Amino acid sequence: MDIRMRMRLLDSVRRADQAQAAHTAAGRALTRATEAAVKALADITSREQLLAQAGTDTERAERSDALDAARTAYIDASRRKLAARRKSRRTFLAARAANRALGEHYRRYARGRGTAGLRRGGVAAGLLDELAALPLELLQAAHVILVQSSAGKDSVVMLDRIVTWARQAGVLDRVVVVHCDLGDESEWPGVRGLAQRQAERYGLRFLIARAEDLDAEPNDAGERPALGLLGLVKKRGMWPDALRRLCTATLKRSVANRLLTKILDELGLDEQAVVINCMGIRAAESPARAKKSPLSIDLRTSSSNRLVFVWHPIFDLTETEVWQRIAEHALEYHPTYDALIPRLSCVFCVLAGFDVLVRAVRLCCALGLDLPARYEDLEAGIGHQFKAQFTIADVIAEARRLETEEGPLAWKRGDAIAHHLGAAAAADYLRRLTGAAR
């Protein structure tokens, strides 16, 4: 079974999964509508009893009006229940049709291939594992290869690996680098420019995705000002956290999806587009990330017009291996790493630990950035702690204490390489980097 057939099967699985999810949601809506209708009917009975007990003309008039309102509410609830029942029926038929289509496609494209007793998800996981093991064929099957770049160490290594494979597969022209610009109030200085240089090193198309403040008035060109993290927090009145990562959803995912739609419109395809969306996630980063699959279908973004795969091309690499590739290939990385900040995420990431945040405050002091004071003022203004365990004010206080005891942070170019690989590797990297720049 070739890669195109595997993708057709996976798209059939996606359609069946989405149809089943729609039917499940419709079933929940029907349950809620039924409960609302029962409650509305009980309210009518209660209102009738109250009306019968009315002692004055005024009470009878008021309770009669309340009974009429309850009957109207019951009629509305009954209509919603009927509509929900019809939708549940439609989604049931759609789910059944999608499952039948999946069975037909499996018989057509996977003749003689058993399912080994696996359910739909297990079959899909097996197919995805097969595709992930064929990186060149996977890239060749794609109409667009998106590389989501934060300009961080994992992103630049992922980009280098994708470029290597894309050249071998003869599809380098399909690679597009996308950087979600979080703005000066969220990112370290120079991040956007670095992401662009990393893309230009290979001659790739580079696009910037940026969230807009939809509540602001557009300018003469129809553009609205950017919505950064602080503006988003101020609107919501709360900081994001591990469970409510509104920064990822609003400032990254949604704007990147809109950019994808624009890219596909430019292609003008008359068939379903295959998109490979590459992200620099590694299994070694955390137990939660280790549970992810190297390749998956993006059910939220995929549709009849596009089949979107989420691929983690460096999922298997350790942190040491990442730095080894940076050193060996003379890949430019952000100087923040030289100050031993472990990740090039937001300056003050809500997922970072206390010590990392303290170091970030000290780095801001060394660079003359006013972000710590701005975050502290916003935290006090909205009355919501930066993290449940501590406030940003606590972080700043600890950073000031260390500054007093140890003095300002000091670092030099190559310190990140020296920290991970040794001084000799750092010196060799700097020579390679100087040579690559010539």
Image (cartoon, helix red, strand yellow):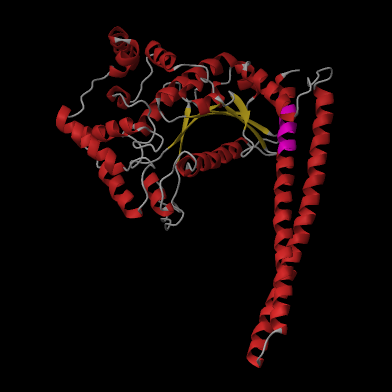
State the image quarter where residue 420 is shown.
top left
Is 9 in the magenta? yes
Tell me residue 14's x, y (percent). Answer: 70, 34
Horizontally, is 68 left or right of 378 in the view?
Answer: right
Where is residue 185 shown, x and y percent of the image? 33, 42
Q: Nearer the viewer, residue 222 or 357?
A: 357
Q: Is residue 72 visible?
A: no
Is 19 or 228 nearer to us in this picture?
19
The main secondary structure of the magenta stretch is: helix
Q: Which residue lies furthest to the top in this view?
A: 424
Q: Where is residue 408 in the image (x, y as percent from the top left)?
A: 18, 29
For the point 72% across and 69% down, the residue is: 42
Quadrant (top left, top right, bottom left, bottom right) of the C terminus:
top left
Left or right placement of residue 390 versus residue 55 in this view: left
Query: Residue 43 is drawn in which quadrant?
Result: bottom right
Q: In the figure, residue 427 lies in which quadrant?
A: top left
Pick the front one: 62 or 234: 62
Q: Is residue 207 magenta?
A: no
Q: Is residue 171 left or right of residue 120?
A: left
Query: Most extreme residue toward the bottom, as rendered?
Result: 57
Whether residue 384 is visible to the viewer of this picture, yes or no, is: yes
Q: Which residue is drawn at 79% across and 38% down?
A: 98
Span shown in magenta: 7-17
| Residue at 52 percent of width and 28 percent of height | 288
Q: Is residue 178 above or below residue 438?
A: below
Q: Nearer the viewer, residue 339 or 238?
A: 238
Q: Is residue 68 above or below residue 237?
A: below
Give residue 176's position: percent from left, percent from top: 51, 29
